[in-house]
Amino acid sequence: MTAVAGLIQIGAAFALLLHGARWLLVGSARVSLALAVPAPLQSCVLVTAFAAPMAILLAVAALIGAPGMAGGAVIGVQMLLLLLGLGLHASGQQAPRVTAGAWRDMGALIAATLLLLLFARDGALVRWEGVLLLAAAGGYFWLLVVTAAEGMTFRLDPTLRWRVLLFGAWQPLGGVVLLLVASVLMVRGSTLLAPNVGLQASAAGALLLPAAIGFAALRALPQLDDDRWSNETSGLLAYVVTALLLNAGVVAVLGSDATSQLLLFDTWVLVAVTVVVLLVLLGSRPLSRVETSGLRLLYLAYSATLFEPLFSNIR
């Protein structure tokens, strides 16, 4: 019965996460248009709105979840975004080139991953480390602003500005409310389901939470209908970098040492996967079916290692 109750809560949470992530991302973009936010700052608005649903879910997990669930989700979200999100996104690219923005974001992703590895070398994140991770996210936003390419502007008829603002402000606010409710349901449902499918708390955080919130966030991106963010790998890399820094920072600041535990094995796997994915993205594009299939298989292999007791000896 606990497994059934967990599945019901996870199903309800997933439906709310889909709507909440879409409302927050699309609504934030519309509000930034209505307020005529400068283009470089709009980049920060978009990447923050993308990462916010994940940060909200992990914050709830850190506060009410089982020990280790939030920490496991930090790694799990990155694995999903790198192996599934970037793989699916890059497979549609037609231009075999690496732009200045791509080099910036690739370097930032490497730096963020190494920073996480440095802090997680003892298998945990503490609050002062979380503060530094959030500060690094702020530094990355500053980098996005100062390196923003010219011509990145959103155009809106001034006569529509206030109407869009009045009718669009409810979306991001409503999205946050939906995400909070969905996060509580998702964490509680995962806590009930995990023991019945052989998942420890940290493994449940690395598999169940990212599967829901990662898909919800990625599903919302195409609805922006913005060529700048839909046609360049560097755009999605910016989202991945922001997600890593915000997720790890929020979990470390809000959780105790017990709820901020990271799986050290998984952290090293994340470093290796980051290197592999970036090397693949530096190659010819669009990616071949072999390359995209390989990324999916890597994610399936990682997911398989989360189940106990098969892989208990390596964790």
Image (cartoon, grey):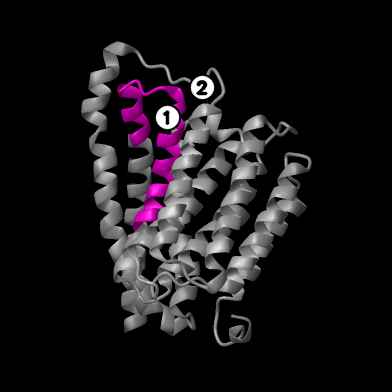
48 in magenta: yes
Residue type at mark 1: give it.
Answer: Gln
Above or below: residue 100 compared with residue 138: above
Q: Residue at x 26, y 31 (%)?
A: 168
Q: Position of residue 280 (x, y in %)?
A: 74, 49
The image quadrant where one finds the N terminus is bottom left
In the rendered image, residue 86, in percent from the top left (x then y), is placed at: 61, 48
Q: Position of residue 216 (x, y in %)?
A: 43, 52
Q: Is residue 79 magenta?
A: no
Residue drawn at 32 percent across, 82 percent down: 2
Q: Tag on residue 262?
A: none
| Residue 8 visible in this rendered orientation of the protein | no
Camera-nearest residue between 310 and 106: 106
Q: Residues within 10 Å of mark 1 (few under 14, many from 20)?
A: many
Instruction: Determine the residue located farthest toward the left in the rendered image.
Output: 166
| Residue at (34, 75) in percent of width and height | 6
Which tag, 2 or 1, sits closer to the chain's start? 1
Residue at position x 59%, y 66% in the image: 267
Q: Quadrant of the C terminus?
A: bottom right
Tell me the residue that label 1 is attached to: 42
Residue 78, image quadrant: bottom right
Q: In 3D space, how far apart are the residues under numbered discs 2 and 1 (Cα atoms)?
A: 9 Å
> Residue type at mark 2?
Met
Closer to the camera in the image, 255 or 85: 255
Pointer 2 and pointer 1: residues touching (CB < 8 Å)?
yes
Residue labelled with disc 2: 152
Q: Nearer the viewer, residue 137 or 53?
A: 137
- Relative image position of residue 19 (x, y in whole percent): 34, 48
- Mark 2: which secondary structure? loop
Residue range (magenta): 28-56
From the viewer's perspective, tell me whether residue 202 is left or right of residue 52: right
**Dot 1 lies on which element?**
helix
